[in-house]
Image (cartoon, rainbow, N blue to C red):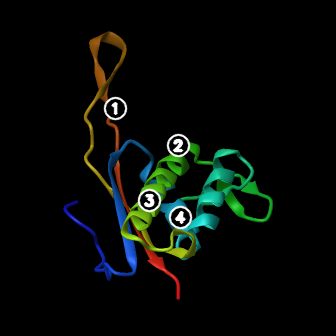
Amino acid sequence: MVGYTMEADPDTTSRAIGKEIPISPKFSREICRMIKGKKVDIALKMLEEVTELTRPVPIRRYNIGVAHKKGVGPGRFPVKAAKAISKVIESAKQNAEYKGLDAENMRVKLVAAHLGRTIPGHMPRAYGRSTPWNQQTVNIEVILEEMK
């Protein structure tokens, strides 16, 4: 991933990117879907509730065998991914403050998770064999927009 996937007006937006974060691509996409379009404070509060295991993240794709949660349907609590995405959103919020924008009056215009580099590894098996055991990474991009 070289840059951002969306062009944004630098006068009213701030952005941040997190590269090669070792989290689940599936859960990071679902979290991005959950918080897109929300105000920054509400999005950060939602992610904090996920880490406290009080708000489940709805799993929309590849949800066979996923237990239903009250009021959500199939859902899980991806704590590691929620913490990583909240750090990137906090960074974009700090960038907005640095640019002189009103950080309290911002909304999440774009939050996207893209596959990053795969870190190769292996797991030892019986009789001197091994199995590939690779670590997937995710690139997260966030663009915050000042509301009118």
Tell me which numbered mark, 2 or 1, is placed earlier along the sequence: 2
Q: Residue at x 65, y 59 (%)?
A: 46
- The picture places residue 58, in percent across and down from the top left corner, at 64, 62
Q: CA distance from mark 2 to mark 1?
A: 19 Å
Circle 3 is placed at which residue position?
94
Q: Earlier in the sequence, mark 4 or mark 2?
A: 4
List the residue tagged with mark 2. Answer: 80
Q: Position of residue 22 (x, y in %)?
A: 38, 41
Closer-to-camera residue (59/129): 59
Q: Which mark is residue 13?
A: none
- Work out whether residue 133 or residue 2 is closer to the camera in this orientation and state it: 2
Label 4 residue SS = loop
Question: What residue is shown with label 4?
Answer: 61
**Mark 3 belongs to which amino acid?**
Gln
Q: Nearer the viewer, mark 2 or mark 1?
A: 2
Residue 64 in the figure: left or right of residue 97: right
Badge nearest the viewer, 1 or 3: 3
Find numbered disc 2 in the image and state the secondary structure of the residue it sits on: helix
Marks 3/4: CA–CA distance:
33 Å
Image quadrant of residue 43? bottom right
Residue at left offset 32%, top offset 83%: 9
Residues 70 and 4: in front is 4
Q: Amino acid at mark 2?
A: Lys
Give the labeled residue for mark 1: 133
